[in-house]
Image (spheres, helix red, strand yellow):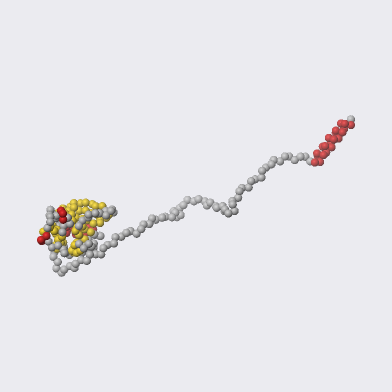
Amino acid sequence: MKRPLLRIAIYYLLITFLTACGSPAAPTALVPAPQALPSAPPSETPTAIPPTSTPTLADTATVTPTTGPTPTETLLPLLPLPTLEAVEPALDVWDGVPTYLGDSLPGFYFRVKYNPRVWALAQDSFGQPALSHRGIEYCILAPGGVHGLPPGLQVEHDIRKIGALTFEINVAMLNGQRQFVTYQATDGVIFTSFQVNFVDRIDDCLAAAEIVLGTLASVPESQATPVP
């Protein structure tokens, strides 16, 4: 009987020991510590992004294209005109060498008649005889035609009877604006041409010039009085 009593005594001693030490704690799950986010380098400062907005007309700058100064043509000085005499004939004459000598009979000049109160016979900018209108500045009727056109010029052609002769008329145009007009005609003896230059009052200048051109005729050299 002593051995069972000894086992019971050991059992109660074991229970007493465990009760004194306390019950074991429940196992705790290991939770990893939160990882800190990497911070920006000391030299960099985060920039706040402004909220987007729709641009208005007041916020939009308007850019107006600019162009350079418009080139203006420098006009030549006005031709010095002879003074009107106290008594002038109703019509005066202007005799000259035809511009197309190879197509004209030798020994003949052209002749036109003009009103000396409207036109003055003087030298043009090249030192050649020409008619200059007294009332329209830069309106000049001179011998000669166009042998070569500058780039950009266009020519409108017309054929029309002026006076007793049929003229070939060439209107030089630049950007839709008339620059000068040439007139060519023949009476079967001479073949010659004239050029009308102008700046403004173009229609008045051309109308006055065609009155003069309507008198065009040939005259023998012996009867001509060419301008010296």
Q: In the picture shown, does residue 27 fall above or below 137?
A: above
Q: In the picture shown, does residue 93 fall above or below 22?
A: below
Q: How many marks?
A: 0
Q: In the picture shown, does residue 52 fall above or below 119?
A: above
Q: In this view, does 32 lie to the left or right of 120?
A: right
Q: Residue 199 lies in what quarter of the image?
A: bottom left
Residue 149, position in %: x, y? Answer: 25, 54
Q: In which quarter of the image is the N terminus?
A: top right
The residue at the point 24 percent across, 64 percent down is: 78
The residue at the point 20 percent across, 66 percent down is: 81
Q: Is residue 49 left or right of residue 82?
A: right
Residue 1 visible at all: yes
Residue 133, position in %: x, y? Answer: 20, 62
Furthest toward the bottom, the residue is 86
Residue 212, position in %: x, y? Answer: 16, 59
Q: Residue 102 lies in what quarter of the image?
A: bottom left
The residue at the point 49 percent across, 51 percent down is: 53
Q: Residue 207 lies in what quarter of the image?
A: bottom left
Furthest toward the right, the residue is 2
- 193 or 70, which is in the foreground? 193
Residue 91 visible at all: no
Q: In the picture shown, does residue 32 fall above or below 227?
A: above
Residue 15, position in %: x, y? Answer: 82, 37
Q: Quadrant of the C terminus?
A: bottom left
- 40 or 203, which is in the foreground? 40
Furthest toward the top, the residue is 1
The residue at the point 19 percent across, 64 percent down is: 122
Q: In this view, does 189 lie to the left or right of 132?
A: left
